Image (cartoon, rainbow, N blue to C red):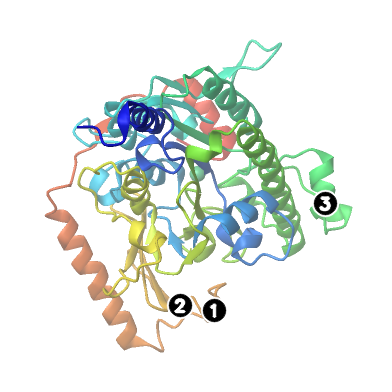
Amino acid sequence: MYPWGLHGLLLALAVAVGCADRPEPDDPTRRNLILISIDTLRADRLGAYGYDRDTSPTLDALAARGVRFETVIAESSWTLPSHITLFTGLSPALHGVVSPEHKLAESVPVLTEVLRERGFRTFAFTGGIYLAPNFGFDRGFETYASAMHESGSEEMRPIAFRTALAYTQRRIAEFDPSERFFAFIHTYDVHCPYESPAEYTEMFDSRPASDQIETQGNCGNPTFNEMQLSQGQAQFLSDRYDAGIRQADDHLGRFLARLEKRGVLEDTVVAVVSDHGEEFLEHGQIGHLTLHMEILRVPWIVAGPGIESRVVTEPVGLEDVMPTLLALLEIPSPPTEGVSMLPAIRGERRSAPDRARFSELGVGPELRSAVLGDHHIIEGWNHRMLFDWRADPNEQIDLATTEADRVAELRAVLMENAGLRSKSPLKAKAGLMGQLDEDLKRRLRALGYAP
Ligand SMILES: [Zn+2]
């Protein structure tokens, strides 16, 4: 009955049991997820995306061993709607959270809830403000921290990146290795007021002392924009911004090295994104108040077990992040506007043409934009601009008057999209937050927002 004898049977059982105890390290059903959002990080300031300053050795290395999405178009130019898109796979037009008075409708499934239902331990350390839990970000999280007492201070402060990473590392160490986890980390370290220690600012300072200006208290509209900065002063701010990127990158580097040493990265997918970029007078403003490419193009890098080194050139959006990350974990996604980019991550080519990427800003919206092929249209109530963003990446040459046919084509794409979204079954009605509390208002003003 047992031609291999009892000894052979026991051996076979031992092997089988051993396999059950020690699954393949790249088994998707064992993978954890770490999602990191570095707020206000424009793609073209990273070496992996072609920048010539050494701002991002860690992210460059992560991109080299994982997948880098070359053209990621954020669906909005500011923190709240873009992050809601990240967690829902829906555009601002469909999730409806387009003003600080809005909160996400309970009916919209979020990434964290999907993972929590699958038994993931879920926790987040964020910079708060527009990632305050009451906008809906805390749904599905066991722990959602957005502010804490810094040592020796009575005041609750937004959590700095280094602190968020340290807490994340500590929390991961507490889990039983059989438990899967989802960690979300968000930081404003790169955001105005662009403050970094001298060791970082000195790496990137290119301006004489006469161009230096105070950043604290001057963020956003209308302050910097009322100051009518010179190009040299804008470059000073831009240098400080680069210093902040390098500082965040170094923090991330130490964090990933510690996780690697402890073997955590062997079965953890790490994804790094941003919600929008930043402008330094390219189009007359400082901050993120336009829909030009310096605002819309953000990084998205994903690395981990089973992910081979690759660059995906097809234009994607933040709405694709949730279905893609779930696909990497072999977990079905709720319906989203975004699509899973898993085939592209595996190197499979799509036969479909590139999708137009849409972005918007304000209620209405006041500005909307579409990127299709080489062209980018930006349209407001009474004006529109057209750029060949590949040939003119800084968008200095407005083609709206010389390429009327292309303008008409892209306007038709915008109108069709607006019509489709108005009838979409995924369209949600955002709830109202009620009054913003005084503390949140104060924090918003400090970041340059005026609620
Ligand atoms: Zn932001």
Could you tell me how far apart the alpha carbons at marks 2 and 1 are, in whole angstroms? 7 Å
Could you tell me how far apart the alpha carbons at marks 3 and 2 are, in whole angstroms? 34 Å
Q: Nearer the viewer, residue 62 or 208?
A: 62
Q: Are marks 2 and 1 in contact (CB under 8 Å)?
A: yes
Q: Nearer the viewer, residue 262 or 322?
A: 262
Say if disc 3 is inside 8 Å of ligand 1: no
- Residue 21 relative to residue 212: left or right: left
- Residue 356 relative to residue 59: left or right: left
Q: Point out which mark residue 203 bears.
A: 3
Q: How many residues crowd mark 3 within 10 Å: few (<14), some (14–19), many (20+)?
A: some
Q: Point out which mark residue 205 bears.
A: none
Amino acid type of the residue tagged 3 in the rendering: Met
Residue at x 54% of width, y 31% of height? 127
Q: How many residues crowd mark 2 within 10 Å: few (<14), some (14–19), many (20+)?
A: many
Q: How many residues crowd mark 1 within 10 Å: few (<14), some (14–19), many (20+)?
A: few
Could you tell me how far apart the alpha carbons at marks 3 and 1 are, in whole angstroms? 29 Å
| Badge 3 element | helix
Amino acid type of the residue tagged 2 in the rendering: Phe
Q: Point out which mark residue 387 bears.
A: 2
Amino acid type of the residue tagged 1 in the rendering: Asp
Residue 372 horizontal/vertical position (percent): 35, 74
| Badge 2 element | strand
Residue 2 in view (yes/no): yes
Closer mark to the observer between disc 3 and disc 2: 3
Residue at x 57% of width, y 55% of height? 65
- Residue of label 1: 392
Please tell me which of labels 3 and 1 falls first in the chain: 3
Residue 123 horizontal/vertical position (percent): 44, 25
Instruction: State whether residue 226 is above or below residue 402.
Output: above
